Image (spheres, rainbow, N blue to C red):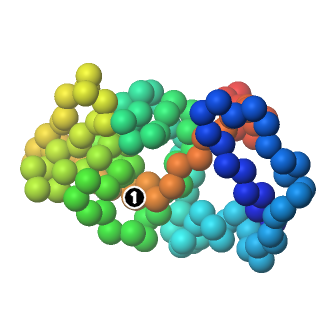
Amino acid sequence: MNIIPISASAGITGFESPAAEYHQLACSLDEILIDHPSATFIGKACGDSMEGVGIFDGDLLIVDRHVTARQHDVIVANFNGEFVCKLLDVRQRMLVSANDKIEPVFINDLDSFSIEGVVIRSIRCHRPSYLLDDK
């Protein structure tokens, strides 16, 4: 894979040819993005509740089931039969959105709750992919 250094700043008017300077990586995107292949799945974000941490509607979430969730990790969980992506507040037993318009949700003893994995990376597609289209 070729890595091309492109520095973008406000008021950009152009840049050198991408082929002018690059270096070759001896690895794949899988190796860069996925730490535990057999314990990893990819989900698609829906909604605006996680925009405060840079996760937007339609972004791809790389979710690792091998990683132990810690305080304020972004997680994917099954909460009362619904898959959600939230910040985990372990100390207060809450699921917190990264959007001030959405109230946190307490995890009560009667709730059905399981952590499906920790979001370790997210990917934003700037053009649609036929592989990701909702059919």
In the depicted view, which residue is nearer to us: 82 or 69? Answer: 69
Quarter of the image with the N terminus in it: bottom right
Dot 1 surroundings within 10 Å: few (below 14), some, or many (20 or more)? many
Residue 95 lies left or right of residue 11; in this view the side is left
- Count the labels in the image: 1
Look at the image and tell me in which quarter the C terminus lies. top right
Any part of residue 75 in sight: yes
Residue at coordinates 39% horizontally, 42% vertically from top-left?
A: 53
- Residue drawn at x 25%, y 27% is 100
Quadrant position of residue 104: top left
Q: Residue at x 39, y 69 (%)?
A: 67
Percent position of residue 47, x then y: 44, 27
**Percent x, y for residue 28?**
74, 68
Q: Quadrant of residue 97?
A: top left
Q: Is residue 80 visible?
A: no
In the image, 117 versus 82, the foreground residue is 117
Secondary structure category for the residue under label 1? strand
Above or below: residue 21 compared with residue 85 = below
The residue at which mark 1 appears reads as 118
- Residue kind at label 1, given as amino acid type: Val
Q: 130 or 120, which is in the foreground?
A: 120
Judge whether 36 appears above or below 14 on screen.
Answer: below
66 vs 78, left or right, is right
Q: Spot the residue most to the top.
A: 101
Identified at 23% across, 43% down, the residue is 95
Left or right side of 106 for 29: right
